[in-house]
Image (tube, rainbow, N blue to C red):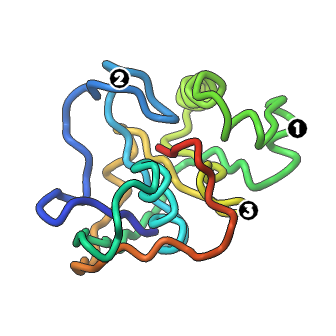
Amino acid sequence: MHRQTGVDTPAFPPDRPAPTAGRYHRPGAGWPLYASLEPATAWAEWSAATGGAIDPRGVTRRLWSLTVRDLPVLDLRAPETRGELGVDVEDLIGEREAAQSLAERARSMGARGMVVPSAARSGAWNLVVFPEGLASVTVGRSRRVHPKPPSDRSISREGAG
């Protein structure tokens, strides 16, 4: 897994309620860890979250490698899982309400995380780890880099996260 942060920001999210909403959490809920299955998707999410307003050549970010073990997840890559839940990928990359509701539902089912579609890069996938699943995540190496958003046209303008 891959996660990008500010240069001086740790890999794990703060251990306090989130002050603002994210795609898979509401304000006041525990802050989940958002990671991507490939580095290009992590950068696409960053670019979408900033609205493309930041020139990646002018900033330095930290790219973390993460290892995840024994994490019970709701894996939405499987069409049959989406079918059983009555969830469409398009619902999860649009308005956040559907994604936030699904996260609450997944947690009530015992999931500690979810594999979810990227809202910033068509066909790509992210991992959301709920606070109660963070013990399953090990931080590997990190490096300071200039962001490298993918050059393909699959980056959404809507914003990620």
Q: Of the residues under marks 1 and 3, which one precedes in the sequence? A: 1
Q: Which amino acid does label 2 sit on?
A: Ala
Q: Name the residue under label 1.
A: 83
Q: Hey, which quadrant is residue 93 in on the image? A: top right
Q: Which residue: 31% across, 72% down? A: 63
Tell me how far mark 2 sits from mark 1, CA to CA: 27 Å
Q: Mark 3 points at which residue?
A: 123
Q: Which numbered disc, 1 or 3, marks the residue closer to the eye?
A: 3
For label 3, the crowd category at 10 Å Cα-Cα, with few meaning under 14, some 14 to 19 and many 20 or more, is few
Tell me how far mark 1 sits from mark 3, CA to CA: 18 Å
Q: Mark 2 points at which residue?
A: 29
Which element carries disc 1, helix, strand or loop? Answer: helix
Tell me how far mark 3 sits from mark 2, CA to CA: 28 Å
Q: Which residue: 67% across, 34% down? A: 94
Position of 116 relative to 109 (above/below) = below
Q: Which residue: 40% across, 70% down? A: 67
Query: Residues at badges 2 and 1 in contact (C-beta under 8 Å)?
Result: no
Q: Which residue: 26% across, 46% down? A: 13
